[in-house]
Amino acid sequence: MDFAVLGWPAAGETLSLDHERFAYAGKFVMSGTGKAVARAGGDVVAAVAFDPDRTDGEVLKLRYVTVREDRQGEGIGPRLLRFIAARASERGFERVVIAVNNPFAYQAAYRAGFGYTGDRTGIAELELARPTPDRAGRYRDGLAAFRERDLGEPAASFLAAKAGSDPPAVLPDPAAADQPLSGHEPDGA
């Protein structure tokens, strides 16, 4: 698995994804956001679009995250989130924020080291950030917020299985020197 930043927002990078295999595929064609991907055998299997927060340039907002339908559940999404959060920190961003609208994305963000801020945005989205105070303590609060909604299956079963649980362990940065995964950015990025 290879993780790469294709370009930061100012680069105007676009990414064409198959709309039948990736959710939010159309959002990646837009040139106003930065893009990072996870590749397996040279094929994109996950992508994230991001840009600085409009009100705080020290905050990077992850706008869209997608994992190819046939590769979901393998932990690729959390590893990609962990990768881009680490690259954002290296570029001087003090905080990375993501809003999620389902418990599976919530769990993935927690595996990447994000924590629920207690804030809700958009239509039923929970905001998570890195770093965040009381990351572990707020984990159950976010799950409870999803339980307030009628999400149906398989989300309801997932939430029932997580009742009373602690947050998952944070994955290592896939680009770290002691990891078997690779990661890079384009020159001059």
Image: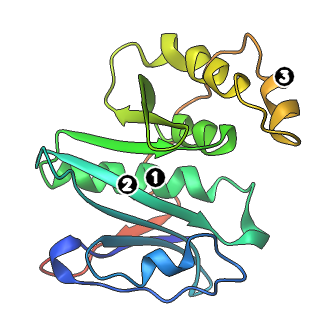
In the image, residue 99 above or below residue 65: above
Q: Amino acid at mark 2?
A: Leu
Q: CA distance from mark 2 to mark 1?
A: 9 Å
In the image, residue 75 above or below residue 109: below
Neighbor class of circle 1 (other Cα within 10 Å; few <14, some 14-19, many 20+) is many
Residue bearing mark 1: 81
| 77 left or right of 147 in image | left
- Quarter of the figure that contains the C terminus: bottom left
Residue found farthest to the front: 123
Q: Where in the figure is residue 91, as x and y percent of width and height?
A: 15, 55
User: Disc 3 on helix, strand or loop?
Assistant: helix
Residue bearing mark 3: 160
Neighbor class of circle 3 (other Cα within 10 Å; few <14, some 14-19, many 20+) is few
Q: Where in the figure is residue 5, as x and y percent of width and height?
A: 33, 72
Q: Are marks 3 and 2 in contact (CB under 8 Å)?
A: no
User: Disc 2 on helix, strand or loop?
Assistant: strand
Q: Amino acid at mark 1?
A: Leu
The answer to which of 167 and 172 lies nearer the viewer is 167
